[in-house]
Amino acid sequence: MELIILGSGVAVIQARRGPSGYILRNQDELYLLDGGSGALRQAAEVGISYREIDKIFYTHLHPDHTIDLVPFLFATKHTPGFIRTAPLEIYGPLGFTEFYQRFTELFSRRMLEAEYQITVIELGARHVPFPNWQLRSERMLHSHNAIGYRFESGGKIFVYSGDTDYCDGIIQLANHADVLLLECSFPDRLKVKGHLTPSESGKIAAAAGVKKLILTHFYPPCDEEDMISPCRKFFDGEIVLAEDLMKIKI
């Protein structure tokens, strides 16, 4: 597997960091994990077209994680020479189907009348087996029905938290992961409910026994403070601070 950071930031507009968005390369498929504004443009920067995306996984419904679904659907339906024909699976938390219908109705019901098949799958705490890999989801402590994802493929384990506070769900999901991509929104001194700090992130990584911890989803104050040392007090494995367009082998 390979992870590509499209956006390591948040809803606050920053030149350095775009809103949440990630590409996971799994065997011969490409997955989009969340997708705030500009995620598809960032994918193009690393040579990945939106037309190549096989599956989309949303952790929750906030706009800094979902808004690029509109240009994705619009471009794959209306652009001559770029119209999609391959089927698409979109995964999301419980309630995602209603969100998807209302979301697309804001622009046009015709956005749902694509030439290709779109399948929406809602997940809570579930295990979903695929022919050559396994998917697991768990509830996170953030917005209503927020979830995180665990991908097990080729003997490797990759876990993505989405947005969350400290909770048992993320520790269980990340158990012995090779790579944990974990939100870390604020420095310890600016703790906000529903989000993690470096110390909390370190505690989660240590409790789960992960090998590599990638911190992401940074609000602007994070770029002015030491985010690694507080995390290092609890976790002695490899720690990486995400940057846009970064590539990580799993």
Image (cartoon, helix red, strand yellow):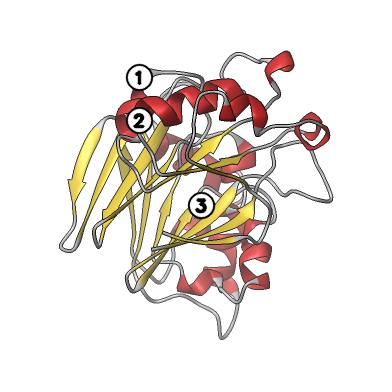
Label number found at residue 109:
3
- Per the rendering, the mark at residue 208 is 2
Identify the mark nearer the N-term, 3 or 1: 3
Residue type beneath disc 2: Ala
Closer mark to the observer between disc 3 and disc 2: 2
Instruction: State the residue at coordinates (41%, 59%).
Output: 250
Picture disc at residue 168: 1
Of residues 144 and 235, which is closer to you in this image? 235
Task: Determine whether the residue tagged by mark 3 lies in a helix, strand or loop.
Answer: helix
182 or 75, nearer to the observer:
182
Q: For this view, does 3 lie left or right of residue 188? A: left
Residue 201 x/y as whole percent: 53, 27
Mark in the foreground, 3 or 1:
1
Circle nearer the N terminus (1, 2)? 1
Determine the CA span between mark 1 and mark 2: 10 Å
Q: CA distance from mark 3 to mark 1?
A: 39 Å
Q: Position of residue 15 (x, y in %)?
A: 84, 50
